[in-house]
């Protein structure tokens, strides 16, 4: 024992667990290492230190969290509840340090212990509790809600396995289970005291009570318990610390061996397994067979727990049930939580004896719905027999809502049977299905799209009949992203430059970035701007080297497309352009060409075969192009594996060019486009989603526009689209397609990409070939613009300077004002 090191704890005056000074932080980190990790410094692993540090940081949020919750219960302020099946919150440590404003002190405290903060930050396993844009949006909104001091709770599911990790083997995507909880999660707080029961299956019974009221009792086949798991989400430099409350499913009965004989023992185990399965895994989107029973059960599970929790809080606030919608607003993040319409009705009517009409007023006033897609195949519907089987009582309520709603439509539009059939909550063409978008629209007081174009199309197409019936319900709230994570945390070098140039304060009022315009012609500033970008590109180049082995030239134009892989996002259009450049170089090896490094990243849904083939194609192109001596380094192609929030932190700041090339009318908004813009990338893009507004803000001279507009897309389709004609009338396009078909990018295998090429030639549902010529032309303009370094840098600055609109603070401000009618509440400490 003699040689055990003695620990030197620094002398500190600050209180334990809440002191923000270097000495207090250092002491508490070591304290946690010993008391919570059971380790001492000399044998502690980096992960032990990461945990010890994270607990020390979490401690600093606790007083804020308690004060925040207390203020909400004590005040009669309304609380915004964001209901979302996904919260893609990303790694927490770095972000919490920034929001608490203790990064520099923590760095010093760790240094005194011989540790490097960046190394510990890099250890964190991110919670991948979302698929992509929609889940990340929910996380950005939580950050803004806390930063704007809005009383808010995020409600969702604590998946044990989040989105799969992506590995690339032999050019193909391989899915690996995401075991994010394996080493423990220091950010979450289990709340066994906050738990609710949720019923499934069985049947209903009705009777008439003494007052002559029609009553229904649901006799479920089984019941599951939902337990709250809280993650504190501190705002940026404010005391507000809201809660992300995720529900974990458990078996109802305690697992007590003595209560069972041998036969029941296994039945009890089965029961436990079935219950725990509910929150086991996140479903990937774009799965052909996504309409799984378990997915419906998951949705109902988290919605029911959340609404029951809101009712509990209402009682805690001492408010009567009639005030529910004055005290709470629930935003439905797409249709995934839309069963809330029927469940809130059930809780009010069956469990609180509220009359139907009163319950309906409360429900509608409390709920609002955000739509995120126009793609017909992505609109959620559930088979009626399945729905009946899983949620019999909720189906009855949906029938009743529908019957009353259709009466209203009949009155407004007498004799219009086609309209009734379109608007019904039940689709009766063929096998009957419940239409969740219709349910959400009917049960909400507000419906919004996520970009101006998307909202307009929503009103004209998918929800046209509803917009005609209730025009006042519809509004646009263009998405936004948080500049704290996607600028301050991801791009610290840019943040320093901004602080030094336009002063601090831009991160909470992003329109202040406009002040940069005054420096867009200042040579010294331009040099610094370029130096920041260069350093970020070097950092990405290093990551590319370590992840893929590919060496890229950080002075080349970094042309980046990162997002989920989907045909409508058209990664294959980008790929066809690369092949075109490659063919040009092969034809004329001395061709002078802007050196480009193409970077792709993104996951394909495991069952989306064409998307996986696109990944294989990109890797096939990379293999050929990167190793061809004729190319001589002028082109590099990289597929960066496992695009997630953590990797995104290095990728966005390193981009020169942002690829936003979806078929017009298909991308609801896009949010990656905003992250690129803030970090000074120029966009090549179509008039789709928020690109339209990005171009408006940036100025058309700072945006590379190409492609058919949404109405042109529709016209081409109406008049009969023959993609093969486009291939035959353009030599470069035809040669590129032929080269893919020949097996050149598949080691001679002429079959591998045949389905992809055939699909483009003969069907091409997303008009890749129709937009090819215009895309290539704009890419030539990009290359040309890149040659003029000063001009390019100026355009880059203009993009950042004019990105203010795309802060999620602006978006949340609009929700508060126009949809929720909520105001901030200041939180005092002590
Ligand atoms: C549905 C049923 C069964 C299983 C999975 C799903 C499912 C899950 C996730 C369906 C869709 C999603 C995610 C959709 C999504 O991320 N949409 C994106 O939302 C962003 C935020 O508004 C927009 O910017 C993007 O344009 C939109 O594609």
Image: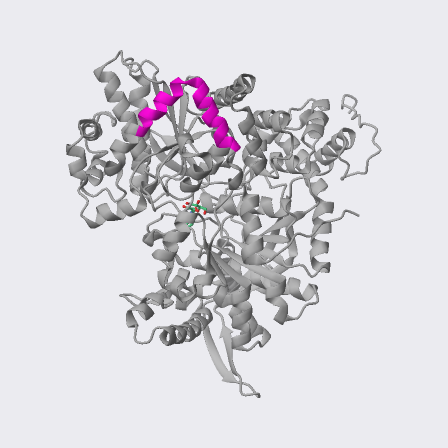
The colour style of the image is: one colour
Residue 100 in picture, x, y percent from top left: 68, 38
Q: Residue furthest top?
A: 590
Looking at the image, is 273 positioned above or below residue 706? below
Answer with left or right where residue 3 lies relative to residue 395: right
Place residue 544 in its image quadrant: top left
Q: Which residues are magenta?
A: 778-801
Task: State yes or no: residue 783 in magenta.
Answer: yes
Camera-side residue of 140 and 50: 140
Looking at the image, is 747 positioned above or below residue 388? above
Looking at the image, is 648 positioned above or below residue 827? above
Answer with left or right where residue 729 lies relative to residue 480: left
Answer with left or right where residue 559 lies relative to residue 214: left
Residue at 73% over, 37% down? 35
Residue at 50% over, 73% down? 218
Q: Quadrant of the N terminus?
A: top right
Q: Is residue 155 visible?
A: no
Looking at the image, is 775 positioned above or below residue 385? above
Camera-side residue of 657 and 221: 657
Q: Main secondary structure of the magenta part?
A: helix
Residue at 84% over, 33% down? 13
Number of callouts = 0
Residue 758 in picture, x, y percent from top left: 19, 38
Q: Is residue 828 visible?
A: yes
Camera-side residue of 208 and 438: 438
Residue 4 in picture, x, y percent from top left: 76, 24
Task: State yes or no: residue 156 in magenta.
Answer: no
Residue 477 in picture, x, y percent from top left: 49, 50
């Amino acid at each position: 024992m003699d040689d055990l090191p003695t620990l030197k704890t620094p002398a500190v005056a600050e209180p334990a667990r809440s002191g923000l000074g270097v000495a207090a932080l250092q002491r508490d980190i070591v304290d946690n290492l010993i008391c919570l990790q059971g380790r001492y410094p000399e044998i502690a692993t980096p992960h032990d230190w990461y945990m010890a540090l994270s607990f020390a940081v979490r401690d600093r949020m606790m007083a804020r969290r308690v004060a925040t919750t207390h203020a909400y219960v004590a005040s009669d302020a309304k609380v915004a509840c964001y209901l979302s099946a996904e919260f893609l919150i990303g790694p927490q440590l770095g972000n919490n340090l920034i929001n608490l404003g203790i990064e520099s002190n923590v760095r010093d405290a760790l240094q005194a212990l011989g540790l490097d903060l960046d190394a510990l930050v890099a250890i964190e396993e991110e919670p991948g509790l979302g698929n992509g844009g929609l889940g990340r949006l929910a996380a950005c909104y939580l950050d803004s809600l806390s930063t704007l001091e809005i009383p808010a709770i995020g409600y969702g599911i604590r998946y044990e396995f989040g989105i799969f990790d992506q590995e690339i083997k032999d050019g193909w995507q391989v899915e690996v289970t995401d075991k994010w909880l394996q080493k423990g999660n220091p950010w979450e707080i289990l709340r066994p005291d906050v738990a609710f029961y949720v019923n499934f299956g069985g049947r209903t019974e009705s009777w008439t009570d003494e007052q002559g009221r029609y009553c229904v009792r649901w006799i479920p086949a089984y019941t599951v318990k939902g337990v709250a798991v809280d993650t504190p989400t501190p705002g940026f430099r404010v005391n507000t610390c809201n809660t992300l409350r995720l529900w974990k499913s458990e078996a109802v009965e305690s697992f007590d061996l003595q209560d069972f004989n041998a036969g029941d023992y296994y039945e009890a185990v089965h029961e436990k397994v079935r219950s725990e399965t509910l929150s086991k895994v996140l479903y990937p989107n774009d799965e052909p067979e996504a309409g799984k029973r378990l997915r419906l059960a998951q949705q109902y599970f988290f919605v029911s727990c959340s609404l029951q929790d809101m009712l509990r809080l209402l009682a805690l606030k001492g408010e009567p049930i009639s005030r529910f919608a004055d005290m709470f607003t629930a935003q439905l993040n797409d249709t995934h939580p839309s069963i809330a319409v029927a469940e809130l009705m059930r809780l009010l009517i069956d469990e609180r004896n509220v009359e139907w009409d009163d319950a309906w007023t409360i429900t509608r006033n409390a709920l609002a719905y955000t739509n995120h897609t126009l793609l017909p195949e992505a609109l959620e519907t559930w088979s009626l027999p399945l729905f009946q089987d899983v949620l019999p009582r909720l189906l009855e309520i949906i029938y009743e809502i529908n019957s009353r709603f259709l009466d209203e439509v009949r009155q407004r539009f007498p004799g219009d049977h086609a309209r009734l059939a379109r608007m019904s909550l039940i689709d009766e063409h063929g096998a009957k299905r419940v239409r969740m978008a219709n349910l959400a629209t009917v049960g909400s007081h507000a419906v919004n799209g996520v970009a101006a174009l998307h909202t307009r199309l929503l009103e004209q197409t998918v929800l046209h009949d509803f917009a005609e019936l209730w025009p006042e319900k519809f509004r646009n709230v263009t998405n936004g992203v948080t500049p704290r994570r996607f600028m301050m945390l991801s791009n610290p070098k840019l943040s320093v430059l901004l602080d030094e140039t336009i002063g601090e304060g831009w991160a909470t009022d992003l329109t202040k970035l406009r002040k940069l315009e005054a420096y867009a012609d200042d040579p010294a500033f331009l040099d610094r701007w370029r130096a920041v970008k260069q350093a970020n590109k070097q950092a990405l180049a290093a990551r590319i080297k370590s992840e893929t082995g590919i060496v890229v030239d950080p002075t080349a134009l970094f042309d980046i497309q990162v997002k989920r892989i989907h045909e409508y996002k058209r990664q294959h259009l980008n790929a066809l352009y690369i092949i075109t450049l490659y063919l040009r170089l092969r034809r004329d090896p001395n061709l002078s060409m802007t050196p480009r490094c193409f970077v792709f990243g993104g996951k394909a849904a495991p069952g989306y075969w064409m998307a996986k083939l696109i990944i294989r194609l990109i890797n096939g192109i990379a293999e050929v192009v990167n190793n061809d001596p004729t190319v001589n380094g002028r082109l590099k192609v990289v597929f960066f594996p496992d695009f997630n929030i953590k990797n995104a932190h290095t990728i966005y700041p390193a981009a020169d060019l942002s690829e936003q090339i979806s078929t017009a009318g298909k991308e609801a908004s896009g949010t990656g486009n905003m992250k690129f813009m803030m970090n000074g990338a120029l966009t090549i893009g179509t008039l789709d989603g928020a690109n339209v507004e990005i171009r408006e803000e940036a100025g058309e001279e700072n945006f590379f526009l190409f492609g058919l507009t949404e109405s042109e897309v529709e016209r081409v389709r109406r008049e009969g689209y023959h993609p093969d004609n486009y291939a035959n009338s353009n030599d470069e396009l035809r040669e590129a397609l032929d080269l893919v078909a020949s097996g050149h990018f598949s080691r001679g295998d002429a079959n591998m990409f045949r389905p992809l090429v055939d699909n483009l030639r003969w069907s091409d549902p997303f008009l890749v070939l129709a937009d090819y010529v215009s895309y290539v032309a704009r890419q030539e303009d990009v290359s040309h613009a890149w040659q003029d370094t000063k001009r390019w840098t100026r355009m880059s600055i203009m993009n950042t300077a004019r990105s203010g609109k795309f802060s999620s603070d602006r978006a949340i401000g609009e929700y508060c004002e126009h949809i929720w009618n909520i105001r901030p509440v200041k939180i005092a400490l002590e």
